[in-house]
């Protein structure tokens, strides 16, 4: 059996300049350090509201590649022979970030001049729902 531990972003919004797992890989018992670059051909995670063409720019890779958009976003996975080694190795993964302004309040998502998380804007989808007799 092997154990995997996720390396998560400490930043709410940042460009990922470099992910270096060499120090983690040098630790005895570490079998792999997987990054977003290693998963370049893996499909993105679909949006739960259903696939629409306008969602293309908002789909999330399994591990962040160029940008993290929330604190805790997975950036790498360390695989080791035992859990303790995987946890220790996680601390050895070096990630170089260029920290960007974070979007903290939902109301700021559409505010002119506010932080922009995605090239196409911060609103991935919108819809109106009506329940009951509105007539």
Image (tube, rainbow, N blue to C red):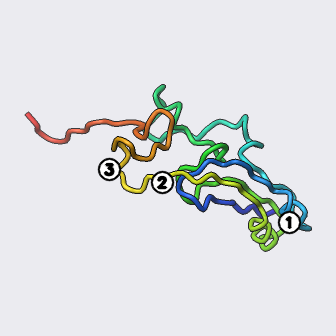
**Any part of residue 37 in sight:** yes
Q: Which residue is mark 2?
A: 102
Q: Dividing the picture into quarters, in which one does residue 99 lie?
A: bottom right
Pointer 3 residue? 107
In the depicted view, which residue is nearer to us: 61 or 21?
21
> 116 and 5: which one is in front?
116
Q: Earlier in the sequence, mark 1 or mark 3?
A: 1
Q: For residue 81, which numbered disc appears in the image?
A: 1
Relative height, residue 99 to residue 67 (above, below): below
Front in this rendered view, residue 57 or 67: 67
Residue 58: image x %, image y %?
A: 51, 37
Q: Which quadrant is the C terminus positioned in?
A: top left
Q: Quadrant of residue 81?
A: bottom right
Q: What's the residue at 72%, 37% (across, down)?
A: 40
Residue appearing at x 57%, y 59% in the figure:
11
Q: Residue at x 79, y 54 (%)?
A: 20
């Amino acid at each position: 059996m092997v154990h995997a531990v996720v390396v998560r972003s400490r930043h709410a919004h940042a460009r990922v300049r470099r992910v270096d797992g060499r120090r983690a890989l040098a630790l005895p018992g570490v079998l792999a350090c997987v990054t977003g670059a290693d998963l370049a051909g893996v499909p993105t995670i679909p949006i739960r509201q259903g696939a629409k063409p306008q969602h293309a720019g908002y789909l999330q890779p399994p591990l962040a590649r160029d940008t993290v958009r929330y604190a805790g976003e997975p950036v790498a996975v360390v695989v080791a022979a035992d859990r303790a080694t995987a946890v220790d190795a996680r601390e050895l993964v070096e990630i170089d970030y260029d920290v960007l302004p974070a979007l903290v309040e939902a109301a700021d998502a559409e505010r002119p001049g506010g932080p922009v998380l995605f090239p196409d804007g911060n609103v991935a989808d919108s819809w109106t729902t009506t329940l009951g007799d509105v007539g």
